Image: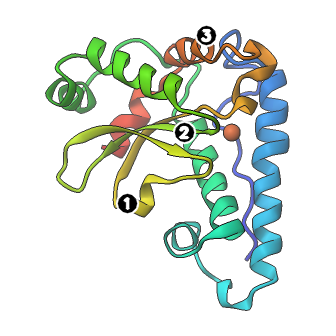
Amino acid sequence: MAFTLPELPFAKDALAPHISSKILDFHYGKHHAGYVTKLNAAVEADSSLAGKSLEDLIKTQSGGVFNNAAQVWNHTFYWNSMSPNGGGEPTGAIKDAIDKAFGSFGDFKDKFTKAAGGHFGSGWAWLVKEESGNLAIVDTHDAGSPLTKGQTPILTCDVWEHAYYLDYQNARPSYIEAWWNLVNWDFANKNL
Ligand SMILES: [Fe+2]
């Protein structure tokens, strides 16, 4: 069964003015879709990969298969990490877990913003739950996935230039500031 591009969990213009529909046309319609197409071609070319789930491929493969599988998974997770009704301060269990791990939401926001802004080149900033149950902020390079380290992703921010260049050019900090207005705390609570 071929992998398919999941539907966006919101309308293409619903994240504006923080992220424009023009970005989503390319980021979702070209980049995310492209990873799905390339993954399907790679799986079709190697019968040993037939029937494996996306998570299986991420945890067991390397090179192009890993890169495309992880980018498919990461982007779906990224769309769900945002909501037109998101932003503001966390509530519920995720609020308590953030306070416990980082002291306060403000301290968490500062640390996450630094991790996302300071990541060199293409990659991802993540809030994850470690195997110990504690929350941590990590950044991964290129297609890198916390799933390979036994961490449970809670939220992610894509810091590849394709995530922001059309709206913000090289100003990654402005994009990250805008991303905070979209953070889907309901999704974070579900993942916790
Ligand atoms: Fe991306």
The secondary element bearing badge 2 is classed as strand
Mark 2 residue type? Trp
Q: Taking the image as four quarters, which one is ligand 1 found in?
A: top right
Location of mark 2 (residue): 124
Location of mark 3 (residue): 174
Location of mark 1 (residue): 149
Position of 161 with respect to 156 (left or right) is right
Of callouts 3 and 2, which one flags the residue occurring earlier in the amino acid sequence? 2
Position of 153 with respect to 18 (left or right) is left
Q: CA distance from mark 3 to mark 2?
A: 16 Å
Residue 140 at x, y percent in the picture: 50, 45
Position of 180 with respect to 61 (left or right) is left
Q: CA distance from mark 1 to mark 3?
A: 30 Å
Mark 3 residue type? Ser
Q: Is residue 166 above or below residue 7?
A: above
Of callouts 1 and 3, which one flags the residue occurring earlier in the amino acid sequence? 1
**Label 2 crowding class (10 Å Cα cut-off): few <14, some 14-19, many 20+?**
many
Quarter of the figure that contains the N terminus: bottom right
Residue 68 at x, y percent in the picture: 70, 60
Residue at image point 34% right, 54% down: 151
**Label 3 crowding class (10 Å Cα cut-off): few <14, some 14-19, many 20+?**
some
Residue at image point 50% right, 25% down: 118
Foreground residue, 16 or 114?
Answer: 114
Mark 1 residue type? Lys
